Image (tube, helix red, strand yellow):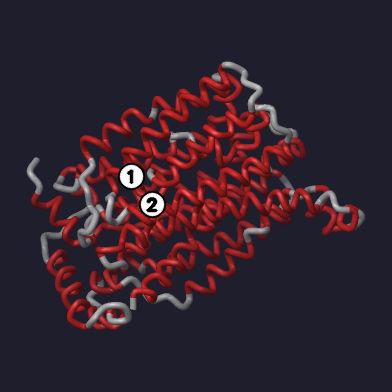
């Protein structure tokens, strides 16, 4: 029974894999696209952040669409956007066309970034919901890692005699403009995601919200006993029986603090600098003295560390709790960012020392902010408006990511690498305060218990 839930969570988590892949695959193409199209620093930032504008649109519409049509249907729509973007980028005839297809991919990322953890949270039992939702973050890190490997491999393939001597479209995609192959490679996981989504059931909590209790019970009984399934349905119905609310009520009612926590942590998680490393890692590592090939290799190492330390969250999030992981992680993030800034300021030529503390930063983010954020966003909002509320919080993720994607080239040029890393460290002070002083612990509680906590807490 438990494995059935895990399989459903794994399929939904593939949205995270595509999110990570789409986010990271661009890192190997930035220098190549900039050189081919003669991009300025501002246009380089636009190439990276254009997809992030799409993510904001995707998140904006995914919430209320999923509340109306269901989580599954909009997840399928996100998979279609992923596939269209990958194919379009591979054959795009101009820089503007490339940006349009990146925007389309961004819409898919935005939808999946909200709906994958939301779907998992709504099918998962309370006792291991944290672990199952954290699978989504693990999938993101795996997507990032596979994208790094794919970029490094395709760059290597482009230099092989058997390929470099080819002609026509094959030569254009895999040799002359190998960035096309890098971006187009996302087609494969996108099609796999689409096919597997057809086999998963609708969210039982969404079905109950729509008055389809019999369908919900049938789905719940795949991984729960009949008595437990009926109890789950009764708990959800009890929550739904309370006075109706609109999104305006969330910002001024008992859920106001939940919205503030979600939005603030979502924004700050991205201004930690994680995506400066994901998007501009090769450029930053070249600043530290590595060549492009070595820098891409360094990105692969970053990806491996990102995956490995996410397993700590999977292991501990349901017994240690959300708060401790977040607090310890943020302290580690701040410390490593400060040290990396110092090393750049001192113009160190010890690239191994620099990589050690960049990897420390990645490790701390991977077991804390990365997985804990998505777990919290998927569980702290009321059922009636969960899709819309999570859309708003997730939009804060992408506003932060867009800011970092657009501004990092400017930061590196004007604040220099050391100032850039110190700026990100400074942004972690309010995050630490929120984690220590404001955030409640939600481990082991059902979604309905968490909802009732906000309703009954004292002001």
What x and y, as percent, mark residue 102?
60, 50
Q: Is residue 351 visible?
A: yes
The residue identified by callout 1 is: 325
Say if mark 2 contacts mark 1, CB within 8 Å.
Answer: yes
Q: Nearer the viewer, residue 392 or 232?
A: 232
**Viewer-proximal residue, 246 or 75?**
75
Q: Residue at x 27, y 44 (%)?
A: 323
Q: Position of residue 225 (x, y in %)?
A: 23, 81
- Residue found at the very far top of the displayed protein: 346
Which residue appears at 51% of the width and 57% of the height?
A: 108
Tell me: residue 121, above or below residue 7: above
Q: Earlier in the sequence, mark 2 or mark 1?
A: 2
Residue 237 appears in which quarter of the rendering?
bottom left
Look at the image and tell me in which quarter the C terminus lies: top left
Residue at the far right: name it.
165
**Is the N terminus in the top left, top right, bottom left or bottom right quadrant?**
bottom left
SS assignment at label 2: helix
Local packing at callout 2 (Cα closer than 10 Å; few below 14, some 14-19, many 20+) is many
Q: Is residue 264 visible?
A: no
Mark number, residue 313: 2
Q: Residue at x 78, y 48 (%)?
A: 177
Q: Nearer the viewer, residue 173 or 300?
A: 300
User: Left or right: where does residue 265 sit relative to residue 304?
Assistant: left
Instruction: Tell me what residue is drawn at x 53 percent, y 46 percent.
Output: 305
Residue 200 found in image quarter: bottom left
Left of 329 or right of it: where is 301?
right
């Amino acid at each position: 029974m438990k494995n059935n839930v895990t399989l459903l969570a794994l399929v939904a988590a593939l949205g995270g894999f595509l999110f990570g892949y789409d986010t990271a695959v661009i890192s190997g193409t930035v220098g190549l696209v900039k050189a081919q199209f003669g991009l300025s620093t501002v246009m380089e930032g636009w190439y990276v952040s254009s997809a992030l504008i799409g993510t904001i649109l995707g998140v904006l519409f995914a919430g209320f669409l999923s509340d109306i049509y269901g989580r599954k249907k909009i997840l399928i729509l996100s998979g279609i956007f992923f596939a269209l973007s990958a194919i379009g980028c591979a054959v795009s005839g101009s820089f503007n066309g490339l940006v349009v297809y990146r925007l389309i991919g961004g819409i898919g990322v935005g939808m999946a970034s909200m709906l994958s953890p939301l779907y998992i949270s709504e099918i998962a039992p309370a006792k291991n919901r944290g672990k199952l939702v954290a699978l989504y973050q693990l999938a993101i890190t795996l997507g990032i890692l596979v994208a790094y490997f794919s970029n490094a491999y395709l760059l290597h393939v482009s230099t092989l005699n058997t390929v470099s001597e080819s002609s026509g479209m094959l030569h254009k995609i895999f040799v002359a403009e190998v960035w096309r192959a890098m971006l187009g490679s996302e087609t494969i996981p996108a099609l796999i995601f689409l096919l597997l989504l057809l086999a998963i059931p609708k969210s039982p909590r969404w079905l109950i919200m729509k008055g389809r209790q019999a369908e919900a019970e049938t789905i719940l009984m795949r991984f729960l006993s009949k008595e437990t399934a009926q109890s789950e349905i009764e708990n959800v119905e009890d929550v739904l029986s309370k006075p109706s609310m609109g999104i305006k009520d969330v910002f001024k009612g008992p859920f106001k603090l939940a919205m503030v926590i979600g939005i603030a942590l979502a924004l700050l998680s991205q201004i930690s600098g994680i995506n400066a490393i994901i998007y501009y890692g090769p450029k930053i590592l070249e600043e530290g003295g590595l060549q492009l090939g070595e820098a891409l290799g360094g990105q692969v190492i970053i990806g491996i560390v990102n995956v490995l330390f996410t397993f700590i969250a999977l292991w501990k999030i349901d017994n240690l709790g959300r708060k401790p992981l977040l607090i310890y992680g943020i302290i580690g993030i701040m410390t490593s960012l400060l040290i990396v800034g110092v090393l750049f300021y001192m113009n160190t030529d010890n690239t191994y020392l620099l990589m050690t503390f960049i990897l420390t930063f990645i490790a701390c983010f991977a077991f804390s902010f990365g997985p804990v954020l998505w777990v919290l966003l998927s569980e702290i909002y009321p059922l009636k408006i969960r899709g819309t509320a999570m859309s708003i919080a997730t939009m804060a993720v992408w506003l932060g990511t867009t800011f970092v994607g657009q501004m990092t080239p400017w930061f590196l040029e004007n604040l220099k690498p050391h100032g850039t890393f110190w700026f990100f460290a400074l942004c972690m002070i309010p995050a630490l305060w929120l984690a220590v002083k404001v955030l409640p612990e939600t481990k082991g509680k059902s979604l309905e218990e968490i909802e009732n906590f906000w309703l009954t807490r004292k002001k």
